[in-house]
Amino acid sequence: MSLNAILDQFCPDLKEYEQLYRDIHQDPELSCKESKTSEIVYKRLEKLDGIKLHKGIGGHGVVAVIENGAGKTVLLRADMDALPMPEKTGLPYASHKKQVDVYGKEVPVMHSCGHDMHTTVLLAVSSLLHKARDRWAGTLILLFQPSEELASGARAMVKDGLFDKVPRPDILLAQHVHPARTGMVELSPGPILTAVDSLEVIIHGRGGHGARPDTTIDPVLLTCHIIVRLQSITTREVRPGELAVISAGSIIAGETANIIPDEARFKVTIRSYNVELQKRLVDSVKRVIHAECQATGVEKPPEIAEIMHAPSTVNDADLTAELKDSFDRHFGEDSTALVPFAASEDFSELARAIDKPYLFWTFGGTDKEKYDEAARNGTLARLPHNHSPLFAPVIQPTMKTAVRSFAVAAFTFLDENF
């Protein structure tokens, strides 16, 4: 029996999972707050007989283990958390939810990175591989991770004894929805995602009346100088051709036009593929912040706190070749190369903790007609991307493709019995 035939025979009815996806999308949960989602996952996994279940690992992490004879141990991972932003998709199942974040602030919540799709897909794959146990041998680990958006969930699960509770995998696999054309599966060897360091900075000034700036030390103006100057790091301190990104995504200062505040806060993210370059970028960012503050004559030095760190994601070359061959045979022309991009992930933390290889790939979620039209018009960059308030993967055939790609990957590395 061919792998295609096995997938057709054992794939569950995805109509049920389409509704589950809508439910999870409409009720998103922030990092460290995924209690409802993890309970949904746990209750569905409970229905699969003969598996070992663990919950509450590293917060709201859920892990299932299917032991099915001698063979390799393969881990499949999905993330569950959403982002603090309002949804503007206009979907009938759009989120209108607000939630208190880890900083104690009530914020709107949206699944704008596709983790609702990841969670739903891995649940469907769990059912497929459980029903197809006579077609493979080995041990399968199904891991549902919290707090990916803070790049802390994988590390928290490891620290909470993940690999004391479940077998150590021989290979770890993860996939992510991407604004490529739906039906496409993208995989390449080597560096795929950048390392990330995010900093929260507090600039201390001296407040006063907006009509008398001479009596103040203006933290708003100073913050603006810092953010503009930070861009010179990537253009003047990084060799042309090397990827480096420094972006400030949050600035908070003051309440009204005629009062210069005594404090300003901003958050900056720093990304690159190279370990040494990443360290140099972080050091340069801190140097610029301190130097601009000194030049302005602040009376209290800035406060700089690291709020996020994740290493770069680098696919193993030999295993990539093996899986790419499987994808090519299964997806044909829709199996394409993944162009590296400057997003970041903490998935590799799971593998690094036990010194095991891993693979990470993407699957498309953009309607075929919309994607092809944008390609003809040269406007692909305008399609809603991950973290956009308009990001809305079409449910099908996105879900079907993702279920099959995860299943194909699992069968590639488990011991086949067909």
Image (cartoon, rainbow, N blue to C red):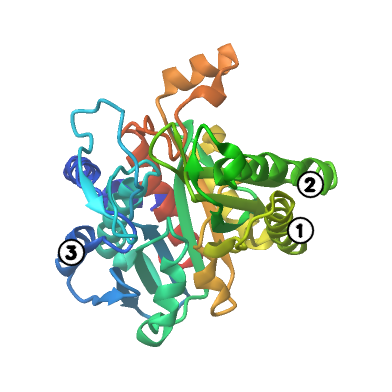
**Residue at horizontal 64 percent and vertical 48 percent from the top:** 188
Nearest-to-viewer mark from 1 and 2: 1
Q: CA distance from mark 1 to mark 3?
A: 41 Å
Q: Which residue is mark 1?
A: 277
**Residue at horizontal 32 percent and vertical 44 percent from the top:** 111
Q: Which residue is mark 2?
A: 242
Density class for disc 1 (Cα within 10 Å; few <14, some 14-19, many ≥20) is some
Could you tell me if the residues under marks 1 and 3 are in contact, i.e. CB atoms within 8 Å? no
Density class for disc 3 (Cα within 10 Å; few <14, some 14-19, many ≥20) is some
Quarter occupied by residue 386:
top left
Residue 84, position in %: x, y? 34, 47
Q: Nearer the viewer, residue 254 or 101?
A: 254
User: What amino acid type is highlighted by mark number 1?
Assistant: Leu
**Residue at horizontal 78 percent and vertical 47 percent from the top:** 242
Q: Is residue 410 left or right of residue 239?
A: left
Kind of element beneath mark 3:
helix
Q: Nearer the viewer, residue 279 or 216?
A: 216
User: What amino acid type is highlighted by mark number 3?
Assistant: Glu
Kind of element beneath mark 1:
helix
Q: Earlier in the sequence, mark 1 or mark 3?
A: 3
Residue 347, position in %: x, y? 49, 63
Q: Which residue is mark 3?
A: 39
- Classify 249 as above or below 181: below
Q: Is residue 351 left or right of residue 53?
A: right
Nearest-to-viewer mark from 2 and 3: 2
Residue 328, position in %: x, y? 56, 43
- Classify 42 as above or below 405: below
Q: Earlier in the sequence, mark 1 or mark 2?
A: 2
Residue 204: mark: none
Residue 2 seen in the current view: no
Q: CA distance from mark 2 to mark 3?
A: 43 Å
Kind of element beneath mark 2:
loop
